[in-house]
Amino acid sequence: MSAVIDPANESMTLYVNGLLVAERTNVTAGPDLSQGLAGQVTIGGIPSGAGAQMFAGQIDDVRIWNVARPIDQLAAVDVADSSAGLVLSMRADDGSSLAEASVEDFTVAQDWLTNWSAAGILRNGAAIVLDETVRAPDSDGDGMPDSWETDNGLNPLVDDAAGDADNDGLTNLGEFLTGNNPNERDSNFDGLRDALEDFDNDGLANGDEEIHATLPHVADTDDDGVNDGTEVNSVPPTSPLHAMHQAVGTANAALPQRSLSLAAGEVAFNGHASLATLGDAWTVEVSAKLDTQATGELVSYNSVDGTQFAIEVINGRPRIRFTDLQRGTMVALACEQQIGDDAWHTVVATWNGPAQELHLYVDAQVVSRIGDDFGFATVSPVSGLGTLRIGHQLTSGFVDEIRVWNVARLRAELADAAGLLQAAGTSGLLLNYRFDDGGTAASDFANVANDDLALPVTAGAMTSTEFAPFVPAAGSVDDSDQDLLPDYFEHLLGLDPTVADTDDNQISDGQEDPDGDTLTNLWEFYAGTNPLEADTNGDGTADGDELAAAADGMTNFDKQRFATLPWTSDADDDEVTDSNEVIGHSNPLSSDSPVRPANGVLELAAGDYLEIPSSLNHVTDSVAVGVWVYPTASGPATIVRRSVGAGRHSFQLAVDAADIPYALVHGEESNAEYGTTDTQALPLNQWTHVALQFNSETGLMTQYRNGRMVDSIELGVAADIPATSGAGPVETHAGEAFAGRMSELRINAGAMEDTAIYTWYDSGQQRSSSAVDLVFVIDVSGSMGGPITRVKTNVAAFVTELEARNLDVLIGGIRYSDTLTGGGFRDTAPDGAGLYGT
């Protein structure tokens, strides 16, 4: 910790572990020295009187300067006692044999000549103790303390960690870490060189630990619950440096998945100082599985001024709250959905201070407080150094995938990232505890190289029996150099996981083929084969020529050539195997290839329905829904609906007992139910297109049949939106109690022109929403009011009139114009008609 008072820059600042955690400006004067009295420096508290406070714990390296030190100098571990401006330096490294034990001030030279007049006196049982966790001075930064280097004849001012003074195969740093003598080949004289000893009893000799870059004094370097020797010596091996690794040697191998059991007790951590500077915009995410309707905190961060954020449950219902900096009062936002149902739920809270927007997302619904919802004055969460708490007052259940961002993430960003792991270095990601790594501490995968940010947990608290279903976004999530190879796999190959082209030969590591078996490193990873062995299983067939795991007749090389995954036989899920698509010269990565007749429909019996995955992409201020239906039995039935609770619909298209189509939308702002109704029954055994639109911008709700408006109402509340929250569950279903067929179901997030709704009916696809002055329907269904011969006559007369007036026209999505080269109206067209277009 460092405090700096700097009147010259009018500032007062507080740093923790080199991070700025608090600051005051307009500080125009230093400490009050007007009385001119001698003061007393007290370390460890004020023992008595007003404001008495005592410190319990350990303190080291106390320094006082008469200058404002910059941050880069404040972080220095080793400082010369003669440094300019240093007026007090108590390192507690001296010990004391005086009757009144003292602590030397190392800025005072030869203080013994004045009977230690400048030394501090230890009071009330305070003592100097040895603590091996305290970093000893290391002037050259080679990982070995100056004192140890000096005692063993090494130079404390030169980085000689990689040296081997006694030529025993173990570096000087390795000798230090294992407690050996760098000048003695066999430090314990047992007949075994130091490099061949196994100091940490993990199954790896000290020298082998250096080959694999593991720690010779720690049995489980990556703290994944598996010793280094077990990982290195397994067949195939796993990485002893990466807790998140897949089982190599298996196609489509899964990542380890675990969660944190709340039955193991609350987790409290003071080490994440970066949360103190979160600022006035943040996002907090947590997944939880609770088996009771409990009350307690899933995750929170609290400082002396209050709560910066807390995602909690109140009788099983999620809530976000924080303490307002100006008033000291609580700001809260709750959701009605009950999540104490022994199922996994994702809860996300976002705060945007400048916009005054607080959102709480529970699975695929959202509750919001915006602008004036907070009153006339603005609010802002408190900040400052504090404690991260997980599971406070919760005694059962599980949490997983806790993430904190220093930005207010948008709804679309949350929707796109739902269920996906996030990689270190993702913009704005400040903290990420996955709880997938096992071991004695949960790594912060946003800062995976910083062990100081690992979360201490109770042994066995990270369990593999329960976990939220998160998967990598693109095969592997931890890929520092973005070469598509996961870091742990590159380590096993001897590649540099931080450099995309380790050997700098202009070929990405993922595209190299070191064993010459025609498979790149990336496809060897996919196939579960060894990139350093041309014939991994030793059966006489090169890895590229082996049949792929999908057993569809394609080899691993075929899969690589056509970019299909080795373990799938139908990559695009179009009911045509990859091998048959390759033989037939169609695209195995596109479900539209080979081209099929567009006659696929959804067939439903009375008890069937289609369940559509819930998504935040379906949460929208305006919505349009359309579908072709072919009922074979009468209603009542639901055609399509999205609901956020019983009877609370974001939208619903349905038919009543008389087969009359109707639409319902529940307003989020008004809590009112809006409804429209058709005037005619839906005919049985005939295709009809039905649609609804809720437009919050125009304040209208409209219902359509075959592209034409049949009913419309004005909303009761200006800018009302479809229901975004409720008691849950969130469901999007089509065809409940409906018997018949459906086709071309579309949900559009946002308002549409009436003409665009019409194209859903007219063409089966949405086209440009540009204005259309005239719509002329050409079909053979009789809807034009006459037999086909009359239709043809009408069309001919219509085209002749267009030609005579020299008009441009858009028919069926094709524009015809005299100004278009090779098209437009002509007196004599190639086919004898008056209308011609290219």
Image (cartoon, rainbow, N blue to C red):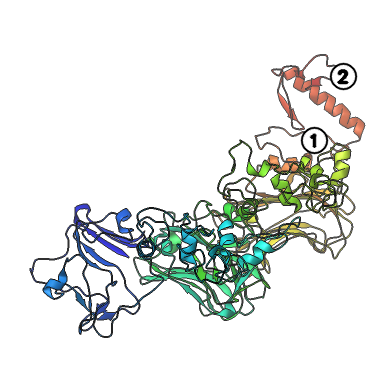
Q: Position of residue 18 (x, y in %)?
A: 36, 59
For numbered disc 1, what is the local secondary structure?
Answer: loop
> How packed is label 1: few (under 14 Cα within 10 Å), some, or many (20 or more)?
few
Residue 596 seen in the figure: no
Q: Dividing the image into 4 quarters, which one contains the N terminus?
A: bottom left
Q: Amino acid at mark 2?
A: Asp
Q: Is residue 316 visible?
A: yes
- Which label was assigned to residue 815? none
Q: Is residue 16 left or right of residue 556?
A: left
Above or below, 93 against 48 in this view is above
Secondary structure type for disc 2: loop
> Tag 1: residue type?
Val
Q: Nearer the viewer, residue 728 or 468?
A: 468
- Kindly report which numbered mark, 1 or 2, lies closer to the viewer in this rendering: 2
Is residue 122 placed above or below 245 in the rendered structure? below
State the residue in front, 446 or 769.
Answer: 446
The alpha-carbon separation of the residues under discs 1 and 2 comes to 21 Å
Q: Is residue 506 above or below residue 497?
A: above
Identity of the residue drawn at 32% across and 73% down: 59
Specify few, some or many for label 2: CA neighbours under 10 Å numbering under 14, 14-19, or 20 or more.
few
Q: Quadrant of residue 652?
A: bottom right
In the shown orientation, is residue 221 left or right of residue 24? right
Q: Which mark is residue 777?
A: 1
> Which of the 4 image quadrants contains residue 250?
bottom right
Q: Which mark is residue 831?
A: 2
- Residue 397's image quarter? bottom right
Q: Position of residue 447 (x, y in %)?
A: 50, 58
Left or right side of 105 for 240: right
Q: Residue furthest top?
A: 828
